[in-house]
Image (cartoon, rainbow, N blue to C red):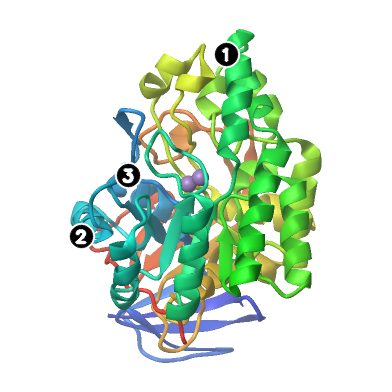
Amino acid sequence: MNILIKNGTIITSSDIFDGDIYIKGEKIDGLGESINLPADEVIDAKGKYVIPGGIDVHTHFQLPVKGTVSADGFESGSRAAACGGVTTFIDFAHQVPGESPMKALDERIEEAKNDVYIDYGLHLGISDFNKNVLKEIPIYIERGVPSFKLYMIYAKEGWMSNDATIYAMLEAVREQGGLVIIHAENPYIIDMFTDRMIDEGKLDVKWHPVSRPNFVEAEAIKRALYLTEVTGSRIYIVHTSTAEGVALVAEAKGRGVMALAETCPQYLVLNDDTYLRDDGYLFLTSPPLRKVKDQLALWKGLSMGAIQVVSTDTCTFTREQKEPGKDDFTKLPGGIAGIETLIPMVHSEGVLKGRISLNQWVDLISTNPAKLFGLHPAKGTLAPGSDADIVIFDPEKKVKLLPENLHYVVDYSPYDRMTVTGWPYITMSRGKTIYRDGEFMGEKGRGKFIPRYYAD
Ligand code: MN
Ligand code: MN
């Protein structure tokens, strides 16, 4: 099947021009100012943007947490993704302590296989580091899983890495050519503050950010960056949420440390006032929502290139699942939805508010994630030979972000008081239209596990 997209404004991370794209089967065959070839379908994209499909490198679909499992799984999560213009996501396979990460990887691929509508990759979550894990690193890289997630917190879940593990993993991937990605917060100080909150009866969710002040993230980022510097390795800091964190990453880059960082829409557009809502407990996530000054620093970090990626950390729980923690934030499973609104949100709040350019928008939600995680140039760009993962984006369509306008299992949205300008008109995954003008038409199980490789 050949498809011709006519008269769109084609935007990549480096170019903008009005033109056409020709798709043959699952791949982009060519693009240019005017293409006139026979096609089975011609799509008129006049007045619309044509961009590479979004890539969300941080999701937690059907993740077991605190005795429950995150509500949006591979099926509904990848459906919501497609309806918002995301065509690839990277989730996690978490090693079970005492077992080989290989087992987790095989099981996770099996879990996703029949449910995904779009392509996906996996990071490997290392929770029980030992000599065998170290030995197996080249095998994971060979299998297309070259990014290793370490948590500096979550001791109770059994996921926490100590400084020695972080050091050893940084050293190992420097040799083998992978990437350490890290959740940076200081667990001991969080525990101390949390105990204080419990002692003082401060259990409403509004105390959650008080139990994890900015310096708790900054200290951990600083330590992670220092270990990266002494090992000569590179690191990717997930969900950077504080002004202090951005400053540390920017400063480290300035002295030549290979520091990479992402932030998420919740830190860019929401602040800790959200926890004052009657239903504020629904929006507990970690790191917590911060202050307006942090939002401003994060936007600046994006525009200056200190932060390279906007991902979502999507991890949803129904009201029922959040209920046990309604009056006690220490019992809340953490996480919120975000994958469906990622691309419209960064467009509406970033591009339309003059904080980033159209090219930067595409870079942050597609090209950079593809490059940093070994998906480029098959994904993350519009070029001959690339996968036809394409979004035709209507820059004027307004959508109020009410749960009924979104496609998650959860029936509430952290962004329900916001309206975005700009929404996908068509989402195409490897040449197949899976969303068009409000209608989802994906084919379950068509998404593939994509092995990811770094160029050298
Ligand atoms: Mn995290
Ligand atoms: Mn996460």
- Badge 3: how crowded within 10 Å, few (<14), some, or many (20+)? many
> In front: 434, or 277?
277
The residue beneath circle 2 is 106
- Mark 3 → mark 1, Cα distance in angstroms: 36 Å
Q: Residues within 10 Å of mark 2 (few under 14, many from 20)?
A: few
Query: Would you call the spot at circle 1 few (<14 residues within 10 Å), some (14-19), or many (20 or more)?
Result: some
Q: Residue at x 62, y 16 (%)?
A: 197
Q: Residue 342 location in percent, x, y? A: 55, 51
Residue drawn at 47 percent across, 28 percent down = 412
Q: Position of residue 198 (x, y in %)?
A: 57, 13
Residue 267 screen position, x and y as percent:
65, 43
- Tell me what residue is drawn at x 41 percent, y 59 percent: 89
Q: Can the viewer see residue 213 in this picture?
A: yes
Give the position of the N terminus as an image quadrant. Answer: bottom left
Q: Is residue 362 shown above or below 416?
A: below
Amino acid type for the residue under numbered disc 3: Ser
Q: Which residue is mark 1?
A: 198
Q: Nearer the viewer, residue 157 or 442?
A: 157
For the residue marked with disc 2, what is the amino acid? Asp
What amino acid type should be assigned to the residue bearing mark 1? Ile
Q: Position of residue 299 (x, y in %)?
A: 75, 54
The relative height of residue 325 versus residue 169 in the rendered view (above or below) is above
Residue bearing the label numbered 3:
76
**Residue 415: quarter of image:** top right
Dot 1 falls on a residue whose secondary structure is helix
Q: Nearer the viewer, mark 3 or mark 1?
A: 1
Please indicate whether residue 406 sits to the left or right of residue 14 in the image: left
Name the element at disc 3. helix
